[in-house]
Image (cartoon, rainbow, N blue to C red):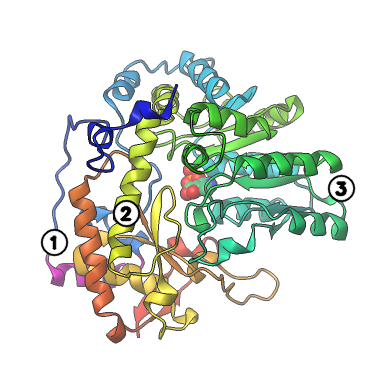
Amino acid sequence: MSKHKYETMGQQFGRRSWAEPWKVKMVEPIKMISRAEREKAAEEAGYNTFLLRSEDVYIDLLTDSGTSAMSDRQWAGIMLGDEAYAGSRNFYNLENAVQQYYGYQFIVPTHQGRGAEHLISQALIEKGDYIPGNMYFTTTRLHQELAGGTFVDVIIDEAHDPQDQHPFKGNVDLDKLQALIDKIGADKIPYVSLAGTVNMAGGQPVSMANVRALRKLCDKYGILIYLDATRMYENAFFIQEREEGFADKTVAEILKEFCSYTDGAWMSAKKDNLVNIGGWLATNQEEVAEQARNLVVVYEGLHTYGGMAGRDMEALAIGIAEGVEDDQIAARVGQVRYLGELLLAWDIPIMEPIGGHAIFLDARRFYPHIPQDQFPAQTLAAQLYIDSGVRSMERGVVSAGRDPETGDHRYPALELTRLTIPRRVYTQAHMDVVAESVKAVFDLREQTKGLEMIYEPAYLRFFQARFKML
Ligand SMILES: Cc1ncc(COP(=O)(O)O)c(C=O)c1O
């Protein structure tokens, strides 16, 4: 199948970049409340966009997690739910879909991604282990730490520079990994935690060459590779677009080859797989599958539902096949790119190259006068909401949390505000509104002040922390 298959009519005639490969069948009304109401709502939410009521939000770009619009086929699948406690036929459909598209042998369903992270961390990590990975993700690292491990970032340096144009900023730096192996010994490294399109680095992909080389290095030392497959469809799309030798392969073919270099994966199905809830753990290792099945009955549910209803597993099985279609994924990344290119045209600082699932505003360059301990990215998210009711999310010092040893804030190089685009939900007109609002907030940047944190929860503080304006 050639990639020309998903060219729109416009592209075929060289007219415009893309159009959505779907039409709207059902609508959900949204409304914008007044500025005074937004100011009140923001204050009541402690200037944390996670604490806003969604009714007070106009365009919700908090996350692409569980916010996708399901298709008519997925909704039809919901009616085919087999709600038997054990052995639901929907589980077998899900198992078949993961085997077919990702290529793994054993599948354990979970309620969402972090359920699978919990299982794999408990199954593979022993106290005192080190888990190298291509940049941390909040819940992933926390489960690794709770299992007694220490996460070590081995992503290439370019990933920490928001302006570097490297096409595969998600790549693992094999020299950093080798140095870690030399320092602590391979027996203290149960697996490499590899993520496709690295969320915290701005949705940046890993190349096929990099995963192949990583496999070679890990094989030399008997180290496993487990993949965070949450946004691997987008990663496969970037490989098709940017890496030599893949232009004529489908996203599905690229996905399967990439996964073949790994021993298993965990998945937040709420992203690429186009469902509102769900996740899975997959592995080619029978003993890991057995451990995961033992654990899943304690923490999630029986091993043939893992916290999902039968109907949810059916929608997920259908979503796995739909999400990986070339036209779907090209339009998804194309919409993100449309928003990013508008902002770049106005010289608004964003993380580049434009990633797969979101535009990351570079809050350091946006608000150079606000020090990191006054939370510039959190400030920007609050200001955007007040301006237009657009909800975004902080991905900077608040998300990074505190160092468990020193108790001090972790100060990440990247201080970003994420505008995350749900799949199949908003139109190009919504993107225009968002871009103009960012521009309006940018124009007022010099008079904007930072925030002070007045409540800090013990875990994953970005979800529930509260702030006041300085
Ligand atoms: C890269 C990545 N991994 C794991 C997760 C955790 O998945 P969930 O939110 O479904 O628990 C997420 C969700 O935000 C994610 O973006």
Q: Which one is nearer the viewer's eye here, 239 or 235?
A: 239
Percent x, y of residue 309: 43, 26
Q: Secondary structure at mark 1?
A: loop
- Nearer the camera: disc 1 or disc 2: 2
Tell me the SS state at disc 2.
loop
Callout 1 touching callout 2 (CB < 8 Å):
no
- Disc with the residue nearer the chain's start (1 vs 3): 1
Rendered location of residue 155, percent (x, y): 64, 57
Label 1 beta carbon within 8 A of ligand 1: no
Q: Magenta region: which residues?
A: 34-48
Check mark 3 vs ligand 1: CB closer than 8 Å? yes or no: no
Q: Which residue is mark 3?
A: 187
Taking the image as shown, residue 360 lies to the left or right of residue 253, namely: left
Q: Which residue is mark 2?
A: 61
- Is residue 43 a member of the stretch shown in magenta? yes
- Give me the C-alpha separation between circle 1 and circle 2: 17 Å
Q: Does residue 251 appear left or right of residue 311 in this picture?
A: right
Q: Which residue in the protein does label 1 denote?
A: 33
How crowded pointer 1 is (Cα within 10 Å; few <14, some 14-19, many 20+) is rated as some
Q: Of marks 1 and 2, which one's residue comes earlier in the chain? A: 1
